[in-house]
Image (spheres, grey):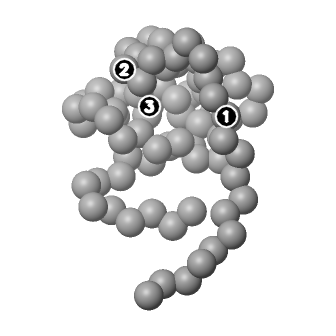
Amino acid sequence: MGENVDVKLEKQKINGFSGHAGSDQLLRRAKGFTNPPKKTFIIHGEIDAETALESELKKIGFVCEIPNIRDHIEL
């Protein structure tokens, strides 16, 4: 059932960064990237807040996606 796939990715730990940070904190952190990630998924929050965060991230060069519940995303 299924196929084994080698996944090539880097995992990094960011100390002192809450999973419940507000949009200001998230944007401040995002602005610190020299090169933004290829794609950023916004997966937590009310749709209005997610859309606002997406808009601000796009202004600084991020490519974003707000998936719907049960969406399947090919990486």
Residue at point 60% right, 78% down? 4
Amino acid type for the residue under numbered disc 1: Gln
The Cα–Cα distance between marks 1 and 3, rounded to whole angstroms, is: 25 Å
Instruction: Name above or below for residue 71 compared with residue 3.
Output: above
Under tag 2, what secondary structure? loop
Which comes sooner in the sequence, label 2 or label 1? 1
When asked about the image quadrant of residue 21, the answer is: top left
From the viewer's perspective, is 9 left or right of 20? right
Q: Nearer the viewer, mark 1 or mark 3?
A: 1
Would you name the residue on which mark 2 appears? 20
Residue 29, x across and y down, in percent:
59, 17
Counting from the top left corner in percent of width and height, residue 55 is at: 44, 31
Identify the image quadrant of residue 47: top left
Marks 2 and 3, the one that precedes in the sequence: 2
> Could you tell me residue 71's position as x and y percent?
33, 62
Q: Nearer the viewer, residue 18 or 57?
A: 18
The residue to which callout 1 is attached is 12
> Closer to the N terminus: mark 1 or mark 3?
1
Kindly check if marks 2 and 1 are in contact, taking CB atoms under 8 A apart as contact: no
Front residue (pair 70, 4) = 4
- Quadrant of image for the N terminus: bottom left
Residue at position x 57%, y 62% in the image: 75
Q: Tell me the kind of residue under disc 2.
A: His
Q: Quick one: 53 or 25, which is closer to the camera?
A: 25
Spatial CA distance of label 2 from label 1 is 18 Å
Numbered label attached to residue 55: 3
Other-residue count near label 2 (Cα within 10 Å), few / some / many at <14 / 14–19 / ≥20:
few
Can residue 23 be seen here? The reply is no
Total marks in image = 3
